């Protein structure tokens, strides 16, 4: 496949040491025919990118970004040069975590691949996260090196000034042509082309993603090099992507949904990806029309926003539409199908799995169904005691397959998620007698809004930190556009302060404290919160209010 692996330097084993004991892991099943032949040593960045160039795709466009187009060969050149910066200038070691913070861009893709190519661990953080949220990630993983898009560097550079662990933040621009003002761009340009990749094992950690939980403390989920190939090879089922079908995904690469759809799948299928630094109906429809996008991967909220403008755009190139991240209402499915002739394939996945584990197939399961387990995975329903529930019943989704839960440094949460070798989610489903799964809701206190998982307690903490607030409770409220919205029920210290101005003040305070997408779109002032005799807030009453 070209350049041989590099000689390994001394490894950083801290992240590896945080893995839970193997007896707490779920069963990992690689028995499916398309998952059996991964070698014991592989570097997923080289397996995806170097192999594509070696197979003759070097001159094919891989990334579309505005007026720019990077071929597979151009992307590989950037990856190799950044890899040299990481290992030769920044002294990044195999197994070391490197923080990546950027909007979707070609340079983010190149930097992510370069980190993994170097044998380090890519930890992508959304540019929407604030300084305190970034500090949690840095402290959890003892991150020394950060790579950041220049336009969103403020919070990370502020953290650098006070962090115990973070030693440097090296900035880049979206296309790597920022010159001296973007240090990574300049350093990469001075490097020699070519270069090796690290000799990593299939079960070395390649990336760590953070998933919110009911406690509000994000959980660090580790995924191995082999895992990232497996999710690609399972995505081929039940509806594959062909090499001549450009893809466009609206989620950021800091999320597993965005990382797989914007980067891993296109590389594995030898197609092209259309990257958007921001998502508006105008920008997205313009990109679909310009680049003749065949496969759109998004969330229902985005699809709803596109509908009113479809008549003024040419979306005739779309032949596949994948959706996940939040419930899909039947009226939206039919409205989209009527407008485009394209079925929405609504799947279910989670950060713990890296990709979808339930999906309808080309045969077309009933509208509203999430289909069956993706080939390579096994799914069933269980009750609160972990006992299997036969088709026709309701219970928690339990999954086994090539990917699953490995929480770093949190054995309690690991035990809660993995039971008897199964990954057991907090998601409640019905399963009909034909075997199709139907989403019911969440057991825990996560609010799923526009595809984002928002921990209610995290928003509560942000609101409670405002001096005007005495106490508050946060719940999810149904919303036709976003699926759910964050509703904050607030008791003020001075009841006379209840006003629309105070609503806006609280909302802006939350946006400034945590990621803006988590802010309460609805704020209700109350004399007191409803409580049980033991003092617990009765949130179900707040949801019905």
Image (cartoon, rainbow, N blue to C red):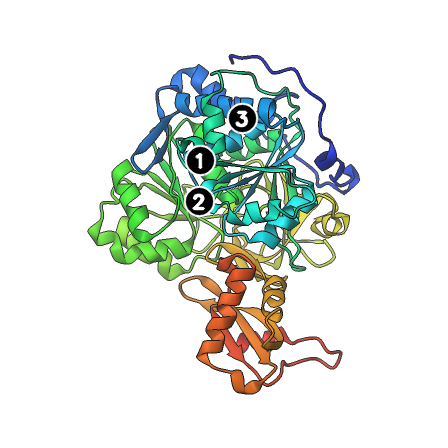
Q: Is residue 95 above or below residue 361?
A: above
**Which numbered mark, 2 or 1, is in the foreground of this view?**
1
The residue where tag 2 is placed is 151
Residue at the farthest left position: 312
Instruction: Identify the residue at horizontal 47%, vertical 21% (top origin).
Output: 190
Give the secondary structure at mark 2: helix
Distance, label 2 to label 1, CA atoms, is: 11 Å
Instruction: Identify the residue at horizontal 43%, vertical 61% (top origin).
Output: 482
Q: Position of residue 511 (x, y in %)?
A: 51, 62
Distance, label 1 to label 3, CA atoms, is: 28 Å
The residue where tag 3 is placed is 45
**Which numbered mark, 1 or 3, is in the foreground of this view?**
1
Q: Foreground residue, 300 or 262?
A: 262
Task: Please indicate whether residue 75 sits to the left or right of residue 453 in the image.
Answer: left
Q: Foreground residue, 68 or 349?
A: 68
Give the secondary structure at mark 3: helix
Q: Position of residue 439 (x, y in %)?
A: 53, 57
Distance, label 2 to label 3, CA atoms, is: 26 Å
Residue 353: image quadrant is: top right
Which mark is drawn over residue 330? none
Q: Is residue 435 above or below residue 403?
A: below
Task: Please indicate whether residue 533 sits to the left or right of residue 74 in the image.
Answer: right
Q: Position of residue 194 (x, y in %)?
A: 49, 15
Task: Please indicate whether residue 415 sits to the left or right of residue 374 in the image.
Answer: right
Is residue 43 something one can see in this rendering?
no
The residue where tag 1 is placed is 181
Number of dots carrying numbers:
3
The first of marks 2 and 1 along the sequence is 2
**Which numbered mark, 2 or 3, is in the foreground of this view?**
2
């Amino acid at each position: 496949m070209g350049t041989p692996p590099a000689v390994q330097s001394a490894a950083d084993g801290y992240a590896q040491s945080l893995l839970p004991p193997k007896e707490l892991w779920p069963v990992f099943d690689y028995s499916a025919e398309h998952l059996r032949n991964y070698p014991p040593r592989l570097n997923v960045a080289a397996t995806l990118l170097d192999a594509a160039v070696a197979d003759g795709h070097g001159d094919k466009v891989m990334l579309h970004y505005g007026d720019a187009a990077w071929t597979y060969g151009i992307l590989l050149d950037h990856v190799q040069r950044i890899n040299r910066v990481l290992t030769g200038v920044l002294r990044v070691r195999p197994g070391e975590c490197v923080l990546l913070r950027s909007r979707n861009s070609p340079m983010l893709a190149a930097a992510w691949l370069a980190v993994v190519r170097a044998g380090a661990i890519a930890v992508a953080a959304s540019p929407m996260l604030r300084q305190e949220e970034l500090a949690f990630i840095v402290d959890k993983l003892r991150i020394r090196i950060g790579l950041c898009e220049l336009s969103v560097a403020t919070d990370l550079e502020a953290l650098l000034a006070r962090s115990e662990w973070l030693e440097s933040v090296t900035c880049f621009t979206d296309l790597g042509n920022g010159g001296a003002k973007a240090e990574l761009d300049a350093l990469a340009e001075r490097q020699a082309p070519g270069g090796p990749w690290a000799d990593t094992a299939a079960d070395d950690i390649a990336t760590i993603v953070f998933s919110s939980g009911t406690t509000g403390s994000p959980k660090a989920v580790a995924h191995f090099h082999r895992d990232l190939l497996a999710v690609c090879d399972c995505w081929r089922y039940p509806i594959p992507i062909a090499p001549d079908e450009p893809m466009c995904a609206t989620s950021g690469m800091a999320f597993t949904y965005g990382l797989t759809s914007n980067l891993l799948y296109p590389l594995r299928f030898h197609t092209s990806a259309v990257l958007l630094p921001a998502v508006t109906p105008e920008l997205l429809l313009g990109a679909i029309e310009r680049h003749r996008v065949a496969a759109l991967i998004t969330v229902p909220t985005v699809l709803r926003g596109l509908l009113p403008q479809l008549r003024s755009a040419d979306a005739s190139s779309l032949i596949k539409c994948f959706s996940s991240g939040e419930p899909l209402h039947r009226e939206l499915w039919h409205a989209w199908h009527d407008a485009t002739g394209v079925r929405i394939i609504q799947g279910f996945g989670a950060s713990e799995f890296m990709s979808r584990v339930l999906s309808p197939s080309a045969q077309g399961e009933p509208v509203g169904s999430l289909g069956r387990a993706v080939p390579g995975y096994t799914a069933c329903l269980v009750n609160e005691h972990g006992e299997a529930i036969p088709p026709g019943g309701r219970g928690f989704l339990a999954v086994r397959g090539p990917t699953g839960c490995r929480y770093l440094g949190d054995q309690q949460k690991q035990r809660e998620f993995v039971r008897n070798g199964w990954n057991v989610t907090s998601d409640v489903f019905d399963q009909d007698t034909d075997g199709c799964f139907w989403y019911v809701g969440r057991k825990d206190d996560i609010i799923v809004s526009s595809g984002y998982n928002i921990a209610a307690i995290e928003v509560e903490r942000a609101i409670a930190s405002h001096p005007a607030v005495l106490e508050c409770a946060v719940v999810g409220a149904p919303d036709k556009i976003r699926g759910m919205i964050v509703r904050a029920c607030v008791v003020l210290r001075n009841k006379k302060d209840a006003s629309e101005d105070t609503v806006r003040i609280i909302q802006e305070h939350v946006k400034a404290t945590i990621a803006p997408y988590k802010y309460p779109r609805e704020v209700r002032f109350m004399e007191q919160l409803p409580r049980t005799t033991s003092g617990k807030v009765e949130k179900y009453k707040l949801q019905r209010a």
